[in-house]
Amino acid sequence: MAVERAAGGSSLIDVLDRVLDKGIVIDAWVRVSLVGIDLITVEARVVVASIDTYLKYSEAVGQSVPVARPALESRPYDELAAENQALRAELKATSGARQQLARRRRAGA
Amino acid sequence: MAKKTTMTKVRRPVKRMARAATKVAAKAPREKRASRRAAEESHVSAADSMRGKYVYCVIQSAEPLKFGAAGIGDNSSEIHTVHYRDLAAVVSDVPLGILDSTRENVLAHERVNEIVMRDHTVIPMSFGTIFKTRDDIVQLLRSAYDAFGDVLSKMRDKMEFGLKVLWDRDSIVKDIEDEDEGIHRLKKEIALQKGSTYFARMQYGRAIDAALQSRSERYGSEILDRLRDVAVASRINKPIGDKMIMNAAFLVSRDQEAAFDTRVKSIAAEHEKLTFKYTGPWPPYNFVNIRLKLERV
């Protein structure tokens, strides 16, 4: 497909994705609101908690690919459950047959 | 050292807005109680003078700068700079109180960053940080001077671009069914089989999932590979929704912008089945994370 570049500010979703929690972030607000103290102004001094810059080139898209479900999680369980059920049914059938057989033998004897 | 900094950072507005307003109002008249009328007057003027400074980004500049009046809130307030040594915060005056993350405000934040970016390397501030006074901002720049300086030099003359890649899952599934022999056979089996197709369907689903996964990984690493020599760095974010197979940001040098642009367009032209959402230039939001704490004095 042909693609054109759109200016940063043209998509609200893309803007929100960036401006809310990236760049320079001041944590105090979160803490204050978590504690539930209703402070509009915080008397405080600024301290750098962490600095990260990301200057590497990623090698692969990796694990975060959105295909339906993780292949390893639910499937084997489903399969095992089904197998389990099938085996139980079989067991029931054979044990029923065996009981019948035993009864018949007793009656014959 | 233990200078006091006051700031507000707010997201959820309406209710708090009311509370903040009453707080401000309650404080104001306390100063003058000589006469009721005087108190009322001072209330009004105090409310007017309760202006804080909204910070958009930090840049390197020892000279005072102006960027017009396209800031947050009422447009009359000019976007200007507050300095500490060779660092500057780009700010504009806003009413002190709660700032709602409305479409208008959020876009204004981004717009100012884009204007400043034309001629400067910026470290963007996250949305919604208001300082009470100019001195508080000087204090911020002084406290984080080394951190800001270091990050600014790393980001010098670099810009961020966004690239999201989406596909039409159903049509890809059809392709896979046509191209993958095993899956093709399974599908036939299910169609022809009498009685329970439980296991066949299970097997089919698993095979499709695995094929989708490997195909999207292949696309992703191919695209990353093609852009490697025209970008400085890349970051992969979590895709949003089930149509997106890649949600990436690239840090690109100014002098490679044209090359990056051409490359993205040619990659897109080669992939009929994929949709590309290409945005920028952005401030380097995805490549800078500076967390500041406030310590109570």
Image (spheres, coloured by chain):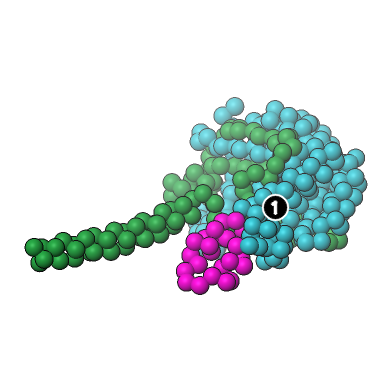
Chain colours: A green, B cyan
Residue receiving disc 1: B215
Q: Secondary structure at mark 1?
A: helix
Q: Is residue B204 left or right of residue B72?
A: left
Residue B159 sits in which quadrant?
A: top right
The image position of residue B23, as x and y in percent, is 51, 55
Majority secondary structure of magenta residues? helix
Q: Is residue B80 left or right of residue B38?
A: right
Q: Is residue B13 left or right of residue B182?
A: left
The image position of residue A83, as x and y in percent, is 40, 57
The image position of residue B170, as x and y in percent, is 67, 66
Relative depth, front residue between B54 and B220: B220
Label 1 lies in what chain?
B
Residue drawn at x 51%, y 53% is: B27
Classify mark 1: residues with Cα within 10 Å, few (<14), some (14-19) or many (20+). Answer: some
Instruction: Identify the magenta region.
Output: B186-208
**Quadrant including the N terminus of chain B:** top right
